[in-house]
Image (spheres, rainbow, N blue to C red):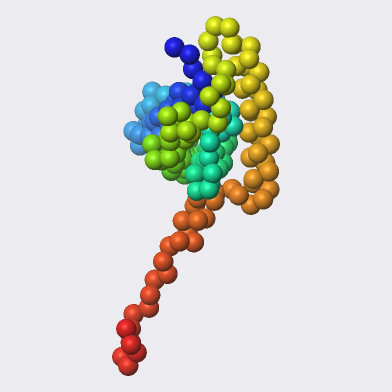
């Protein structure tokens, strides 16, 4: 079965989603029990999570060039992509630090907890993009071009070339949007829509 450009990202994204919290959890338990096996597992798991995060980020940039988005769904995609980039940097930094240290410290675990939270939110946005909006789903007209090459016999060269072009364009678009202040537009829009808390009525004041 051939895999299409926008399908590489969902195929790889589960690796960091599963392994980042698993690595942090193993380290927490390893510290609490002074268990070398758990600490060793946490050290290895964060390294694999970082590699998976890089693969997820790269394929996410490619997928972003192959899907149809506009308005609120475009804001959601931008927020999803940019926060995933942050999570990738966090996972990479944690893996490098953990490589040199047998035991994690409180700062490392704190950063890991934040990274898990960010990753959970971006995973939620990714699910909404696919299941609520239909981004990347051909029958829902969420695919930019139906004739994009697939990873199958006879199209490998074209697939790799197109993926490289999409990756370059994805990086360019991310830089342009961040430069315009569009870093987490979905979160910003949500904060702006939150109703202001009303002050309690006082004696002599109409409620």
- In the displayed structure, 48 sits above or below 185; it is above
Quarter of the rendering containing residue 162 = top right
Q: Residue furthest bottom?
A: 204
Q: Is residue 160 above or below residue 25?
A: above
Give the side of residue 65 with respect to residue 129, left or right. right
Residue 76: x and y in percent read 50, 44
Q: In terms of depth relative to the viewer, which is nearer, 96 or 166?
A: 166
Residue 99 locus on image (x, y percent): 55, 27
For residue 151, above or below residue 116: above
Residue 15 screen position, x and y as percent: 44, 26
Residue 14, image quadrant: top left
Q: Is residue 105 left or right of residue 205?
A: right
Residue 117, horizontal then vertical, whole percent: 43, 43
Looking at the rendered image, the quarter that the C terminus falls into is bottom left
User: Of 177 and 143, which appears nearest the observer?
Assistant: 143
Q: Reply above or below: 166 against 152.
A: below
Identify which residue is drawn at 55% across, 31% down: 144
Is residue 31 visible in the rendered image? The answer is: no
Which residue is painted at 48% across and 24% down in the image? 7
Q: Quadrant of residue 206?
A: bottom left
Pick the front one: 88 or 161: 161
Q: Please tell me which residue is depicted at 34% across the width and 89% down the height of the picture.
A: 205
Q: Is residue 129 visible?
A: yes
């Amino acid at each position: 079965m051939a895999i299409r450009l926008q399908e590489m990202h969902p195929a790889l994204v589960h690796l960091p989603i599963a392994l980042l919290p698993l690595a942090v959890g193993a380290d927490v338990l390893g510290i609490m029990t002074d268990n070398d096996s758990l600490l060793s597992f946490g050290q290895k798991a964060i390294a694999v999570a970082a590699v998976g995060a890089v693969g997820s980020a790269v394929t996410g940039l490619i997928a972003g060039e192959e899907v149809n988005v506009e308005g609120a769904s475009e804001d959601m995609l931008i927020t999803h992509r940019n926060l995933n980039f942050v999570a990738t940097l966090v996972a990479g930094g944690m893996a490098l630090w953990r490589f040199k240290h047998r035991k994690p410290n409180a700062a490392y675990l704190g950063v890991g907890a934040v990274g898990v939270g960010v990753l959970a939110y971006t995973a939620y946005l990714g699910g909404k993009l696919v299941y609520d909006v239909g981004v990347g789903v051909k029958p829902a007209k969420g695919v930019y071009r139906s004739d994009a090459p697939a990873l199958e016999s006879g199209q490998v060269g074209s697939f790799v070339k197109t993926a490289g072009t999409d990756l370059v364009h994805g990086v360019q678009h991310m830089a342009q949007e961040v430069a315009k202040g569009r870093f987490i537009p979905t979160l910003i829009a949500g904060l702006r829509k939150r109703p202001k808390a009303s002050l309690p009525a006082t004696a002599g004041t109409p409620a």
